[in-house]
Every structure is written in C-alpha cells, then in structure tokens.
Image (cartoon, helix red, strand yellow):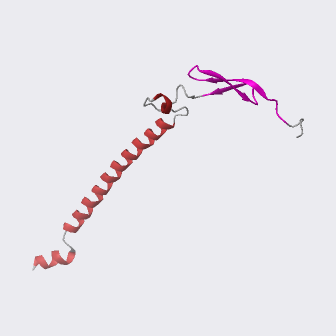
Amino acid sequence: MNTKIQPQWYEEAVVSCACGNTFTVGAAKPSIKIDICNKCHPYFTGEMKYVDTMGRVEKFQKMQKKADSMATALADKKKKQKEKEEKLRSQKSLKEMLLDLK
C-alpha cells in the first residue's frame, strides 16, 4: 500500500448535527457537519414532521396549487368551447332558413 496517496485518518473526528447533538467517529476529516442525526430523525423519534432542508416540500406544494388552478382554468375553457359549439349547432343553416320562407 502506497502511504503517500492515502488520506490522513482521524480517530476522533467530531460529527456535529444541526440539532446540537455531537459524537465522534473515525473519518478522513477532523470535523463533519450534518443536517440530521438519530436524535432528530423522524424515524427514530417517532414524530411526524417534514425533514426538508432545501425547500422541496414547499416547492411541491406550490406546483400542486399551480396544477389545480390550471385544471380549473382548462375546465372553464372547455365549458365555454362546448357552449359555443352548442350555440352554433342551434342556429339554422341557410338552407333551413330559405325553406322556412316558403
């Protein structure tokens, strides 16, 4: 094993979580920062909460609202088109109008 290319190993690397929990592990870095650990993860705590650090839940909810509004707008557009077609069908053709004159 070539020792010149191996990273330095830290036996007591400190891992710091966003919730304030810290613990030590062996790692190639002296300190590691994480967003979630076993003390604050919903699976281990039994709490129902969203673990969202990048705003993905809000982005999804925003897209869902936009899709709902687009669906209602499309339904209104189809309804207006159908009413327009019914109005055109209810009008008499030129042939029918001429036959009524006799």
Q: Residue at x 51, y 37 (%)?
A: 56
Magenta span contains residue 18: yes
Q: Residue furthest left?
A: 102
58 or 44: which is nearer to us?
A: 44
Residue range of the region highlighted in magenta in the rendering: 6-34
Q: Nearer the viewer, residue 72 or 42?
A: 42
**In the picture, residue 66 is in which quadrant?**
top left
| Residue 76 locus on image (x, y percent) | 30, 52
At horizontal 21% and vertical 75% (from top left) the residue drawn is 94
**Residue 84 on image: x %, y %:** 26, 60
Image side of residue 83 versus residue 1, left or right: left
Q: Is residue 23 left or right of residue 95?
A: right
Vertical placement of 58 versus 25: above or below?
A: below
- Is the C terminus in the top left, top right, bottom left or bottom right quadrant? bottom left
Q: Is residue 8 left or right of residue 15?
A: right
Q: Position of residue 48 (x, y in %)?
A: 42, 31
Q: Is residue 91 above or below residue 63?
A: below
Principal secondary structure, stretch drawn in magenta? strand
- x, y (%) of residue 12? 73, 23
Furthest toward the top, the residue is 20
From the viewer's side, name the closer residue of 65 and 96.
65
Asked whether 29 falls inside the magenta stretch, the response is yes
> Residue 100 sits in which quadrant?
bottom left
Q: Residue at x 48, y 31 (%)?
A: 42
